[in-house]
Amino acid sequence: MRTLRICGADLSAFRIVIPSDPAPAVRFAKTFLESVIARSCGFSLPDASGSDEHRILIGTEPPSAGVRWDGFRIRTDGANVYLDGAEPRGTLFAVYDFCERYLGYRKFSSDTEVFSTEGEAELPAGTERIDNPTFEERRCDWFEFQGDPELCSHSRVFSLGKAIPEDLGGQPDSPWECHTMWKFCPGGEYFEEHPDYYSLWRETRVPCNSAVGPGMPCLTHPDVIRIAKERALSLIREHPERRILDISQVDGDVYCTCERCAAVNEAEGSPSGTLIRFINEIAEAVEREFPDVLVQTFAYLYSAKPPILTRARRNVLIRYCTMQGCFRHAIDDPACEKNRETVAKELRGWTERCDQMCIWDYVTNWYSFLSPYPNLISLRENVRFYDECQVRVVFCEDLSNRRCGGLHPELRAYLIGKVLWNAHLSEEEYNRHIDEFLEAYYGKGWKAFRRIIELEHELTRDRHISDMEEVDLGYLHWMTDPPLPGIKRLLHRNYRPGPYQPPLPGSPLEPLVDAIDSLKELMDECEAGAETDLQRDHVRRARFALSYQDLFCRKRNREAMTYAQQQDYEEQVREFYRIKEEYRASFNLNTIQFSD
């Protein structure tokens, strides 16, 4: 069994102490620690008494001045160890850290948990370690996070799905809205009598009726500014507990180009000019009555480029969206011309135009969920850059309602938790986390999967891959003669790859597809080393992403194949669809909404 010595004494000599009226998270922390000790060390600690010489005290100390947000401190004196956070969630995180660091415990995914029953560790007297998160809020909507609050708690991220209960630490009560501009001057209420309140786009006024527009309010119109101010203040008065008010552009690109708006945007060098001036007007009114409330807005699509003249007020929170970036390379990689001229330049520009910023990041390819998405290198390097840009909140948008997203979405989610907590993980630490996950998740053949990941990144080293990257025929730009309105959208929504489908010319994943046989051999090696049915199922799921590349993104000449080869290939396609149905997998953003 595993052994641990604390302050020179064996763990069995200790008793666990919590306050007489503990918070739910502190009570759960005690229960969790007891369970890990029992399973890893093979014994249970008796209840504490007044004569105990050695104690593990959970949540009993006053907050340390060095601990911020939901960080924690682990401290020992000559006989005891103290596990504390400034808030109950931080105290729970201290216990998690204690179990991981000294007892070898790991929670890798919803179905993979490791209790170490071998090895030894020591926590010496006089230890004091404070561990604070890099970012105040860390969010991700990966499928497993959405439905598993306990996994969120262990990963120290906050869910957008099932709420994290108080015994698992809870989560900040901050609204997570977006595309809300229409609520502050709704087209259904004003457009008929006042079309001039809304976007002038290609000489036509376009209303703003919902989160997808289709237009925007005219942000320089005095009446629109007045109406939006009144609605903003009314919302906060109705919800005085609110600390962030979101007023963000709708999801589209039809902004106002009237004479007033065009003049402002020309002077500012970006359509963000009218947006930030409008938000500043509202934020000034909000600050007078509610000085602690932040007004949040997007820097997204047409507003991603910062204005050159106007600075956001101190109570404005800019939510920058990294959508235009290449995620194969780090955002601040000077050798990546795509990032160098877009996201890196814009983010640096916003640091000069605002005091507070959060990031809406993208960690999957919305145009092809089943294709490999080699972003594990940039994942670590990007959060470091976000911290350098003084970002306070990061949201990693992933696939929230399907368990797919490349070759290794579960690993990516695990790493997101690690890097959002510590944006300055060394490469060595990062690789250790990857190796630990792979060994537990795939079994003894994990090194073959490690090689798959290395090849995935090596083969795409010189390619640019965005979060909306065309790598298959799912988003082919169809044309018909005569033109048929809506045909492109119809075909995109009903994309269903079939046998002998040609590959997309120029796909950035071409080098990977060319190496598909080698990758399949490595996957065979990984599966051969799996020791449990669960590990074999994990390999099978990862293989499914390779199968998609093999069957539908690889050139095949039907006429050059023998009849037996055709039959075998077509049976593989049928088997693919059987597995797809079993996994409830989707091809891309369009099909998940309309056909899958």
Image (cartoon, rainbow, N blue to C red):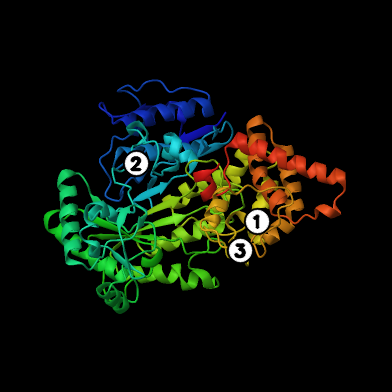
Above/below status of 377 relative to 462: above
Q: Position of residue 3 (x, y in %)?
A: 53, 32
- Outermost residue to the front: 482
Q: Is residue 313 visible?
A: no
For mark 2, does the 10 Å Cα neighbourhood hold few (<14), some (14 to 19), or many (20 or more) residues?
Answer: many
Provide the residue designation for mark 1: 456
Instruction: Check whether the beta carbons of the residues at disc 1 and disc 3 lie within 8 A of each other.
Output: no
Tell which of 234 and 66 is nearer to you.
234
Nearer-N-terminus badge (1/2): 2
Residue 61 lies left or right of residue 331; in this view the side is left
Q: Residue at x 59, y 56 (%)?
A: 374
Tell which of 108 and 564 is nearer to you.
564
Marker disc for residue 481: 3
Three-letter code for the amino acid on which mark 3 is drawn: Asp
Q: Which is more foreground, mark 1 or mark 2? A: 1
For mark 1, does the 10 Å Cα neighbourhood hold few (<14), some (14 to 19), or many (20 or more) residues?
Answer: many
Nearer-N-terminus badge (1/3): 1
Q: Which is more foreground, mark 1 or mark 3? A: 3
Splitting the image into 4 quarters, where does residue 278 fall? bottom left
Q: Position of residue 174 (x, y in %)?
A: 29, 46
Instruction: Check whether the beta carbons of the residues at disc 1 and disc 2 lie within 8 A of each other.
Output: no
Above/below status of 468 relative to 122: below
Three-letter code for the amino acid on which mark 1 is drawn: Glu
Q: Quadrant of the N terminus?
A: top right
Q: Residue at x 33, y 41 (%)?
A: 171
Three-letter code for the amino acid on which mark 2 is drawn: Gly
Question: Count of labels shown?
Answer: 3
Provide the residue designation for mark 2: 90
For mark 3, does the 10 Å Cα neighbourhood hold few (<14), some (14 to 19), or many (20 or more) residues?
Answer: few
Q: Position of residue 280 (x, y in %)?
A: 22, 65
Above/below status of 516 relative to 263: above
Mark 1 to mark 3 CA distance (whole Å): 40 Å
